[in-house]
Amino acid sequence: MLKTLRDITQVVASASDLEYALEQLVTQTKQAMSTECCSVYVLEEQQLILSATDGLEPSAVNRVKLPLTQGLVGLVAQREEAVNLADASSHPRFKLIPEVSEEAYNAFLAVPIVYQKTVIGVIVVQQTRARQFSEGEEAFLMTLAAQLAMAIKGLKRRGLVNHGALQPLYYEGKSASKGIAIAEALLLGGQLSFELEECKGVNLAQEEVRLKLAMNRCKDALGSLSQRFDREKDEEAASIFTALLLLLEKASLAGEYIKEVRLGWSAETAVCRVSKRYIAHFNDMEDLYLKERASDIKDVGLRVLRQLIEPEKIFLEPETPVILIVREASTALLAEFPRQKLAGIVTELGGVNSHAAILARALGVPAIIGVNGILNANLDKRQVVINANRGQLLVEPSSTILSEYRSLIAAEKALQRRYAAELSLSTVTLDSHRVYLYINSGLISSIDSDTGCDSDGIGLYRTEILFMLKQCFPGEAEQLEVYRKVLNAAKGKPVVMRTLDVGGDKPLDYFPIVEDNPFLGWRGIRLSLDHPELFLVQLRAMLQAASDSDQLHVLLPMVSNLEEIDLALVYFEQAHQELTAELGRSILMPKVGIMLEVPVLLYQLDEVAKRVDFVSVGSNDLTQYLLAVDRNNPSVNALFDSFHPGVLRALKFAVERCDANQLPISVCGEFAGEPAGALLLVAMGYNQLSMNQASLSRINYLLRRVSKKELSVLLDDVLKLTSGEEVKAFVAEYCQERGLMALLN
């Protein structure tokens, strides 16, 4: 039975459109349950539409529509529970619909299809013989409906079934980074692996030509990337791609690929066989450096493999800006892709607060995540509109709709110009309260920009981006050079560097961590303290980069107890003493702080204040842990709400305890970059906010038009509310009254 459930679900999930999926669903369910009729009704605008049937009149499909208040099918949707009847016609809600020709059927079993608390349809099975379906049959249909809910919802989002009326083709997901863009779609088919079925080559000469062309395209792409990072004076990144280029020489992997083809294998199989063989060989080595070369071999192999399967797509700079459609956007992919050619991002997987989503916001790129089935939608090279303000992707819209969206884009650009005109002015409220705005960054290029220069400093520099772009742990000299560049780019302003924060949604390819629950596992400072040899290298590089300047502040992530702080400070002292002895002079010790992410530390801030110089609230993780919601899981993503009154009270408690201990506190999570969030944080007493570069001018413009005193009154009312939706509506009303709604939209 489990296999049957899985088979039916897979057929639906892999279907190219909703109509075909539902046709397959009713046919296979009818066969699996050995019944005489199976039908599916889809809920649209409070009407249940007969969308597929195997047993009723076929001509009734998409014509029969039932209000929720009518019929047994409507009863199932209303009550959100199964109805199992031996004689359906005897039930008071029975409604005979002549068009469907169901008079012959007596037995009736229907269950709702529910997606995230919302009924999206009803599946019905019927039989001529008057008998109640068994408990096992009912359980089977309910289990099937539960498994199908996500697949059907994803197909519904595509708008591919118009039920007799012409509708625009569109998809829905979660907005991860606001904005609107119009461009061609570039579809990258998701994850590749070396576990493809092995195939012999039919024409070996042709296979060798295909292989060489694929390798040449990879060489061109890698060469372009190396030159690009050279121009940006990022020698570390450039060296990565130079090293990968060497692997594509005939004396290296390229020669091995060609040998396999000449032995009779297809180009794809040759790449897979060589890659697996050499990865296994290097993984078996004891030398750490050589072991880590396995990741280079994997990287090159996957690049060549993708060029064979999806020619001339990945890592080749498009001629015009594109909207990238992928299974899941990695940080490395976004960092490598030319920014000026990246108009938008659409993914099947990921969460609105995943690291890739955060980077998309930092780059100011519109992004939508959680669009189920988007890779199978045949969107490559078709014109699309991404409206990430509403979480929508429109495909080949009419000229009228395109004109409307172009007007929206022009209006948004005009607003951005208005905000940017004031960016050089200090952020001071109407009643003279000074707020300091910093930027979050992990890319030196964003710090060098004009926007970065207009901030009060760098409130969060994510050192893990450097580690993610490398093929092995960067050494002390590599880190030192990058950190010096960051400090120099900040032009004397404060820079808060977070120590290595990997794990959870930020894995390293060359240091895999496999855990059942990575967000509660081995990440952040936990990993650093367990690997002092890595931690000390990073601390030494930071201390040397700062030299005798007080510009550097060091931030410890994912701290969950006081002992972790104490041990980290011991390593700081060790690194300081080592460098003092080696350099023959004293080095200035930077200020050290912790990220407030784990809720338990809210109740130990008095003790924390005795150990560190400052606190920075990571609102993303703090919210995640307070609400027990995995922020990357699309199934529960709607429950992730930084405006939840309980979360707001925790943030207010934190600033009150820190103020009582004269401990500086800031917020560096995404909440600080949301206009409504910034208003509430300032009302609570936070005067240091760090955000993505794209949010800086908007938040500065907004805070210069509000009164701290008025915000305090607003906060008193907000904290009496019971839900995040109420809070957002209340803040929106406040902004509406002051003509500031455009800043929230």
Image: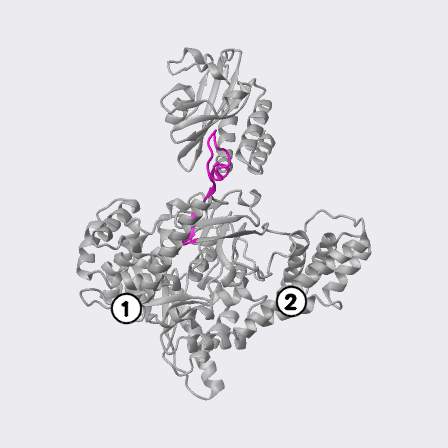
Measured from the top left, where is residue 213 in percent x and y?
A: 71, 59
Relative horizontal placement of residue 310, taking residue 415 as reference (left or right) = right
Q: Quadrant of residue 422?
A: bottom left
Residue identified by numbered label 1: 663
- Amino acid marked by disc 1: Leu
* Residue identifier under label 2: 244
Asked which secondary structure carries label 1, the reply is loop
Residue 91 in which image quadrant: top left
Label 1, label 2: how far apart the Cα atoms are: 47 Å
* In magenta stretch: residue 175: yes
Residue 520: tell me if it is visible: no
Residue at the (55%, 54%) spot, across then down = 514
Which residue is pictured at 26% across the width and 55% down the height? 740
Q: Which mark is residue 356?
A: none
Q: Earlier in the sequence, mark 1 or mark 2?
A: 2
Q: Which residues are magenta?
A: 153-180
SS type, badge 2: helix
In this rendering, would 218 be left or right of 592?
right
Total number of numbered labels?
A: 2
Left or right, residue 249 beside residue 516: right
Is-magenta flag for residue 147? no
Image coordinates for residue 336, horizontal then vertical, percent = 54, 63
Q: Judge by depth and name the residue closer to the eye, 84 or 364.
A: 364
